[in-house]
Image (cartoon, helix red, strand yellow):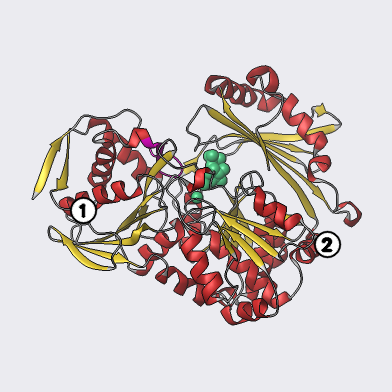
Amino acid sequence: MIRVVATTPFEGQKPGTSGLRKKVTVFQQPHYIENFVQGLFDSLDAFEGETLIVGGDGRYYNREAIQIVIKMAAAAGFGRVLVGKGGILSTPAASCVIRKHEAFGGIILSASHNPGGEHGDFGIKYNIGNGGPAPEHVTDAIFERTKTIREYRIMDADDIDLDTLGITRVGDMVVDVIDPVEDYAELMGSLFDFDAIRDLFASGFTMRFDAMSAVTGPYASAILEEALGAGPGTVMHGEPLPDFGGHHPDPNLVHAKELNDLLMSQDGPDLGAASDGDGDRNMIIGRGRFVTPSDSLAIIAANAHLAPGYKDGIAGIARSMPTSGAADRVAEKLGVTCYETPTGWKFFGNLLDAGLATVCGEESFGTGSNHVREKDGLWAVLMWLNILAVRRQSVAEIVAGHWETFGRNYYTRHDYEEVDSAAADALMADLRARLDTLPGTVINGLTVESADDFAYNDPIDGSVTTKQGIRVFFTDGSRLVYRLSGTGTAGATLRLYLERFEADLARHDLDTQDALAALVQIARDLPDIEGRTGRSAPTVIT
Ligand code: G1P
Ligand code: ZN
């Protein structure tokens, strides 16, 4: 029986770059998630009898949310829900399952790399039939609907047993509890040379994969340890925990320190990799060599043809604007276009659907290809393994060789987290107002060539997205970018992205922060970060 429940709107159920993300306690309020899901269903058309994919990263409140979503999907008229066993589906696996089963769309429960647990964050996002995040017109419609919602519909039914594979029913709707790894593992097997990678491991190659107590544990154990023979102990923190063991499931040098320390030791493994809460991010480290995500994208683009799924070459590359220009140099050499898009994976969707780009990436540890419509952490790891299996060189050798051929883009990101929102907005507004006055100015020995506020014209649907970050270009090719985060949950996060190109082989071994010291000073002084925010140094340096 369908129950119609009276409700009143909550403020601010506006999905951001990666869905609606709030504290668990916000989601636990009566009717909170129900309002959002009803707002979503009310914004969609013609899904009666269709299939919906549901799963999440296993964080606290995942199971409760999934039961609500399933009962509301049944009340709304969906024909079938495929849900990952245990409520688990990594974000890229959800994208894969949506595409493979030609589903109408999918609901992913995750707050990505944000901390989990009772006092952590939770999130919900909707992906469309191509497997990618809902475009802005859909998320805007959901938000509008949640502002006026007065009732929602939910099936009066028992909870689904999420831990047993197989088919049950909720009302007239079929619920199929599926293996969350199977479809994804099959797709990976079709893209990469598993035999060559098996030979690599058999030859004594060693790796550690840090699943950070989040969703990729089961995927990495099945694919790396079992299918590819990397052996037990390869996967660290492999069991998904509701609070991620109290850590931030974010693969960077701060939160995956244990892994990085291991790789920086003389007798460490050959390859280290990590993924985030929902499995879409990746970090790659070779013994003694951290690979920046921007370099990783460029190296993957230059070597993708070594993997069977990409043997005919790539159609194009797409990178988010703040990502370094290293990929552009590869694109130029390959004679393909490198598209520059605003931050956020959703901007790659049209380029991938149209076949204009094959691989894409962001500086924020996101890499992927046209195989799904999300960034994909394990995909990047398998791509690196495939490259290493064919080239039989170390990660450090491959990186050095890449710089020798293409030059090195020194690159760093400085984040100022939880700064006062008003101060951050004023800082950006002031920079915007000064853009026209900057060209020709000499600061700390560097001359500004041009400055702008990045805007993107989508070549497929013609949509225009403005105010995507302030860019300052210098005459020596260096670049500074200022941007406010769209995913934080407390105050504002100011991000500075700094980049300098170095062609001289003799200068490829500088420490990154040293190589960029002059630019760092300029980046701080230009908008007077300390005066405006009270911060003399960033919270996180990557
Ligand atoms: C951050 C990253 C961005 C990524 C997003 C979702 O967004 O910078 O590249 O797409 O998380 O993973 P931001 O907080 O900068 O808006
Ligand atoms: Zn993520």
Name the residue rendered at 64%, 25% in the picture.
431
Asked whether the viewer can see residue 528, the reply is: no
Q: CA distance from mark 1 to mark 2?
A: 58 Å
For the residue labelled by badge 2, is the local secondary structure a helix, a strand or a loop? helix
For the residue labelled by badge 1, is the local secondary structure a helix, a strand or a loop? loop
Find the residue positioned furthest to the right.
506
Residue 209 spot, x, y in % from top left: 60, 61
Name the residue rendered at 47%, 50% in the picture.
346
- Tell me if the residue at label 1 has its CB under 8 Å from ligand 2: no
Density class for disc 1 (Cα within 10 Å; few <14, some 14-19, many ≥20) is some
Residue 462 spot, x, y in % from top left: 46, 48
Please name the amino acid that badge 2 sits on.
Glu
Name the residue rendered at 62%, 59% in the picture.
273
Residue 492 spot, x, y in % from top left: 54, 28
**Residue indicated by mark 2:** 404
- Position above or below: 532 against 318: above
- Could you say which is closer to the camera, residue 9 or residue 71? 71
Residue 446 falls in which quadrant of the image?
Answer: top right
335 vs 343, left or right, is right
Asked whether the viewer can see residue 218, the reply is: yes
Please name the amino acid that badge 1 sits on.
Asp
Residue 354 spot, x, y in % from top left: 47, 62
- Identify the disc placed on residue 214: none
Residue 195 falls in which quadrant of the image?
Answer: bottom right
**Residue indicated by mark 1:** 159
Q: Which residues are magenta?
A: 14-24
In the image, residue 115 lies in the stretch drawn in magenta: no
